[in-house]
Image: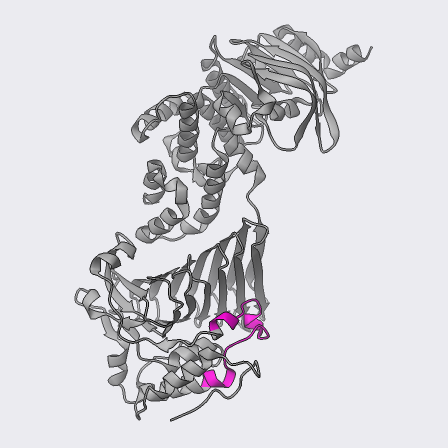
Amino acid sequence: MLSIQDLHARVDERPILNGLSLDVNPGEVHAIMGPNGSGKSTLANVLAGRDGYEVTSGSVTYVGKDLLDMAPEERAREGVFLAFQYPVEIPGVNNAYLLKAALNAVRTHRGEAELDAFEFLAVVKEKMGLMHMDESFLNRGVNEGFSGGEKKRNEILQMAVLEPRLAVLDETDSGLDIDALKVVAAGVNSLRSPDRAIILVTHYQRLLDYIEPDFVHVLSGGKIVRTGDKTLALELEERGYDWVQEAANA
Amino acid sequence: MSSAIQKSKRPGRREAALDAFSAAWSDLGAGNDAATALRRAGFEAFTGTGLPTTRDEAWKYTSLRKLARHAFRPAGPAEAPSPKQVAAVSVDGLDAACIVFLNGRLEPGLSDLTNMDGIIARPMASYLDDHESSDAHPIGTVAAIGQHPFVALNQAFLRDGIVIRTVPGRAHDRSVYLLFLSVPGGEPVAAHPRVFVDATDGSQLTVVEHYVGFGNTANLTNAVTEISLGPAARVDHYRLQEETANTFHIGGLHAKLLRDAQLATHNVHLGGTLARLDIGIHLLDSGAETVMNGLYCVDGRRHVDNQTRVDHFAPHTLSNEVYRGIVGDHGRAVFNGKAIVHPDAQKIEAHQSNDNLLLSPEAEIDTKPELEIYADDVKCSHGATVGQLDADALFYLLSRGIAPDIAHDLLTFAFAEIVAKRMPLAAFRRRLERHLAGVLADDRLIQENLGAER
């Protein structure tokens, strides 16, 4: 589904990704771990197409297409979803409007009919129940005045509504207490399916207690230095990142 | 009674507008009545200064050169639009007594003065005829001719408009909707309507002033509104300026508040080639409060200037001002918000903010919040920003599959919505939101959700 080959990218002239390669197949959950500054968030933003993240070489192929050639909104319509590390507050645009506009943009792209207000609300209310969100959230401004946990839940709600093929969750666990983490994890787990791939970008092993990954990759210095199964995450938790970095440098 | 404009600030340059005002004023005729005395005082004050120039501090960023070239004629009888045409431009869904003015003149055929909930509404001309001396009525006591040349000019032609008086102690559920239509009059026409609202003790009233143009003549609307609020009176004043793209719109909104009175002004500019509104609010006694909300959308080569001034004369008074502007193309917007805290006006609060969204490199904003504080125990804040659409918010929307042009419009809408949602009158807010939504409007959900009561 996703094939990243020897990806180099920089931000403000500063090289961040230095030859990252990764293959992700449908149905798989990949955790990408690494210390601060290793390039985790840069990878997430490059995949979503954010301005200011400049790819200098390498390639990213998504369902057979050149992902880097697509505008951010095209990527979203093709089924790429980024759950933001810091979801932005947009007072004045209500959640319901954003969700409906986003869902209908995706549906139109897939050749499906747009949902009317009733159909839309039926879909959204079901997913909100899943995320333990009150319906009053719909009429509030996007993330406006939301707590950290509410913002992250709102990201997963959007993911649940948009049903992407490839979801990239950028530090979705950061800033969550254990109850909120469980809700978010349950939401993500409910979206696991044989035709959907999920990339979890995280600093901590904790999230992986609740969302069990098929693969764990350690990112250091802008490339993957080690790949293993979920036991690698536990090992990292125990021994810290220095251990992998030293091993990689040796 | 003949008088010429004494002093032109542009020697050697003929100002067609001044000559035309002078001629029109001479044609008014004179009597010994109160109205003539007011008109004379207004004309003398206006001729003393002439049209302001950019050398006047209060007009530094707004040039009247284009306006001055037009020989505006007095508004004569004009062909009235059909009730259907009027309905098409009106604010939908208002529970209000609708009074229509045609180039400033009250149009009885389109107005309803019968179902007023006890409110006294008198055409200005007949109201003035009933008073022999200007001591006997309050017209001209709230808006000062000395500080505002266009108030003086309006008073020089005092005849059109309306006087409204509430029932003491009554909360009037029904609003008063004043619809000012600027219609083609052959040549450019000047209208000088005057509104006086006497909000008596403990009464509550919502007034909506709506300025709309038909056709494309370069008319001048020079409207002045005076609001006198008695103790514990409350007025919600809405002002929607939607003149045509060639119309000059100059307005004054002046108010005096006694003890515990409350005035909310909601000032929206969406039209005109040159629009200017001066708001002056005097908080005269403790407990008086004012909220000032403003929104201006300026595109093309239009120019919109808002000048607000609130004077805190008494302790325990409050003012809170939120103005936002969206300026695109070659548009230009000016904002000057002044709060003056006079000596002994302790324990007051004065807050103001002005935020602007610049949508093109050629657009221009001149913003100047000003605080003058002569008391020492006060809470005051002010701030002004000029910026572009937030890149993070834009990317967030794009990352959800939303097209760039929709994302752009949505964020622009959101910026304005911050002010729109401070306007409690649902019908007015809905009208504004529909305008702001633009291309977004065909989506049912935005109307359903945004139009709903909040």
Q: Look at the image and name its color scheme.
A: one colour
Tell me if B93 is positioned left or right of B281 in this view.
left
Q: Position of residue B357 (x, y in %)?
A: 53, 50
Q: Position of residue B82 (x, y in %)?
A: 22, 61
The outermost residue toward the right is A250
Q: Nearer the viewer, residue B56 or A146?
A: B56
Q: Position of residue B45 (x, y in %)?
A: 46, 84
Residue B26 falls in image quadrant: bottom left
Q: Nearer the viewer, residue B340 or A193?
A: A193
> Range of the magenta residues?
B45-67
Q: Nearer the viewer, residue B428 or A182?
A: B428
Q: Residue at x 40, y 67 (%)?
A: B218
Number of numbered callouts drawn? 0
The outermost residue toward the front is B186
The correct choice, above or below, for B62 with respect to A148 in the image is: below
The correct choice, above or below, for B15 with respect to B116 in the image is: below
Q: Is residue B204 magenta?
A: no
Q: Is residue B61 magenta?
A: yes
Q: Residue at x 31, y 65 (%)?
A: B181
Tell me if A203 is positioned left or right of A140 in this view.
right
Q: Residue at x 55, y 44 (%)?
A: B389
Q: Residue at x 54, y 37 (%)?
A: B393
The answer to whether residue A213 shows anywhere in this view is: yes
Q: Quadrant of the C terminus of chain B?
A: top left
